[in-house]
Image (cartoon, rainbow, N blue to C red):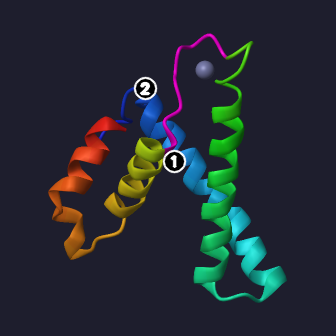
Amino acid sequence: MQAEPGPKDPTDAARAEFHQTIMVAFCNALRTTQLPPITVLGLVAMALGSVYQEVAEAHRGDNPCPCGWQPDPGADVEALQAALAAMIPLPQITDLRLMQALGRA
Ligand SMILES: [Zn+2]
């Protein structure tokens, strides 16, 4: 048996936490709505889009978040699509345009 791994990479930890949270919400929605899984997953994607919209809004205007991030909806949507595709094994995943978009994420 291997020893307990060291402190988790914060990015990996965040991804695992999102996975867990979304899986619970997905299963609840699947049960309560009786919708097909792909329809429920579409709702998950729409929720991500609305979170993006709120975060982007907080980085615009007269009193933006001071972190310096500047939303670029075209490039950002491309990066988010690439991140989604990267987790779903399909032949298109080797498409160089997707790899480049992911590199900017
Ligand atoms: Zn910020």
Picture coordinates of residue 75 (x, y %)? 41, 43
Question: Residue drawn at (43%, 26%), measured in percent from left and top?
Answer: 7
Q: Is residue 1 above or below residue 62?
A: below
Residue bounds of the magenta highlight: 65-73
Picture coordinates of residue 34 (x, y %)? 77, 89
Q: Is residue 91 above or below residue 33?
A: above
Marks 2/1 in contact by CB < 8 Å: the verdict is no
* Magenta region includes residue 104: no
Q: Is residue 66 visible to us here?
A: yes
Picture coordinates of residue 40 (x, y %)? 67, 76
Q: Which quadrant of the frame does ligand 1 lie within?
A: top right
Question: Residue drawn at (51%, 47%), measured in percent from left and top?
Answer: 16
Foreground disc of the pair 2, 1: 1
| Mark 1 secondary-structure assignment | helix
Question: Residue drawn at (26%, 74%), measured in percent from left and top?
Answer: 90
Instruction: Look at label 2 and name its amino acid.
Output: Pro
Instruction: Look at label 1 and name its amino acid.
Output: Ala
Q: Is residue 1 visible to us here?
A: no
Tell which of 28 and 83 is nearer to you: 83
Q: Is residue 96 above or below residue 27?
A: above
Residue lying furthest right? 32
Location of residue 41 by image quarter: bottom right
Picture coordinates of residue 47 (x, y %)? 69, 57
| Mark 2 secondary-structure assignment | loop
Return the mark for residue 16.
1
Instruction: Left or right? Give the position of 96 relative to 65.
Output: left
* Magenta region includes residue 67: yes
Return the mark for residue 7.
2
Nearest to N terminus: mark 2 or mark 1? 2
Q: CA distance from mark 2 to mark 1?
A: 14 Å
